[in-house]
Amino acid sequence: MSLWQERWPQVTILVASLVVLTVFFARQHHYSRYPKLLHRFRWGFLFFTLFFIGFYAQGQLSVVNIFTLLLSLYDGFEIGTFLLDPVIFILWTFTFITLFIWGRGLFCGWLCPFGAMQEMASWLGKTLRVRQRKVPEAWHRRLIHLKYLILVGLVGTSFHSLTLAEQLSEVEPFKTSLTLYFWRYWPFVVYAVGLLVAGMFVHKFFCRYLCPLGAGLAVLGKFRLFSWLERVKLCGQPCQTCKNQCEINAIRTDGRIDYNECIQCLECVVILRDDTRCVDSLIQQKRQRRARIQAVNVGVS
Ligand code: SF4
Ligand code: SF4
């Protein structure tokens, strides 16, 4: 109780921001009509996530939380242990509930401080004109499985030795970057900075291929009940506009969205609502123009 009372300002701001985010997501089809507003809101939220949730409130979730929960379920669940950190408790509860509505993307695209840091690294890379690398589709499809292997390895190890699993979970650079502000024994710093530099070349390299937390959320996200991101008939057959624009390569060549990978940046919904970019809209406009011209011609003759 005293821990919650001590941190009530953080708790209040966090809960308020989650309410705002939920309303925004529930009305995403409306807001996606205003790309400028959506982009500003997203970048504003990413800054909030990195500086308030990450650096200030120390609210970076971790794979360690996953195996702590599994072990506690195995040994006899005790809620008190999880209530010790109000910020982490609220974030986990929110993430867990929204996994069934929007999948892993709501957390990975909006609420993960290291994810936000990578988006900023990617932006910096593009601003400095670093050549963006596209991982070939076949390699991408293989490499995305790596994070699941890491997750299975860590969870398996935790049942054998929790200490070892916690040491191995340093594969997540969260402690180095967010808890210790990159002030640590140099190999850890080189690793964390190296991942951010990799992210300047390949958008969110760590999230796509290595993050065990992202993998864990994707597994739970499989029980998602809705598919919010709108698609139309031409998506993927033959139009590849959204696929080419999706920076994380979460759209398959046949137009389907891979919700295990999608970070809900909403860029594809923005394209779909943009009459000047969506091929489906452009074709419909062309047809309407043709029909109007034919109608005029028939009237004249
Ligand atoms: S994949 Fe991992 S690092 Fe990336 S946004 Fe998700 S939880 Fe964060
Ligand atoms: S562009 Fe669409 S499919 Fe790709 S990450 Fe963003 S919301 Fe998901």
Image (tube, rainbow, N blue to C red):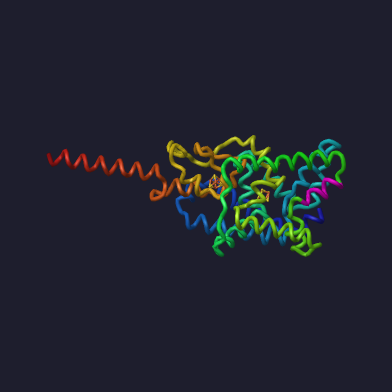
Decide: is 16 above or below 104.
Answer: below
State the image coordinates of residue 268 (x, y, percent, origin top left): 50, 47
**Residue 293 vs residue 157: left or right?**
left
Question: Could you say which is closer to the camera, residue 208 or residue 180?
Answer: 208
Residue 14 rendering spot, x and y as whole percentages: 67, 55
232 left or right of 94 in image? left
Camera-side residue of 201 and 88: 201
Residue 23 seen anywhere in this rendered image of the structure: no
The C terminus is located in which quarter?
top left
Determine the main secondary structure of the stretch shown in magenta: helix
User: Seen in the image, is 251 located left or right of residue 198?
Assistant: left
In the rendered structure, which segment of residues is drawn in magenta? 163-170
> Which residue is drawn at the image coordinates 49% and 41% (left, top)?
230
Q: Residue furthest left?
A: 301
Total numbered circles = 0
Which residue shows up at 73% across the image and 59% down it? 177
- Residue 141 is at least partly visible in this image: yes
What is the x, y in percent for residue 267?
A: 51, 50
Q: Quadrant of residue 221?
A: top right
Residue 188 at x, y = what percent?
A: 77, 58
Q: Which residue lies at the image location 26% right of the left edge and 42% below the top edge?
A: 290
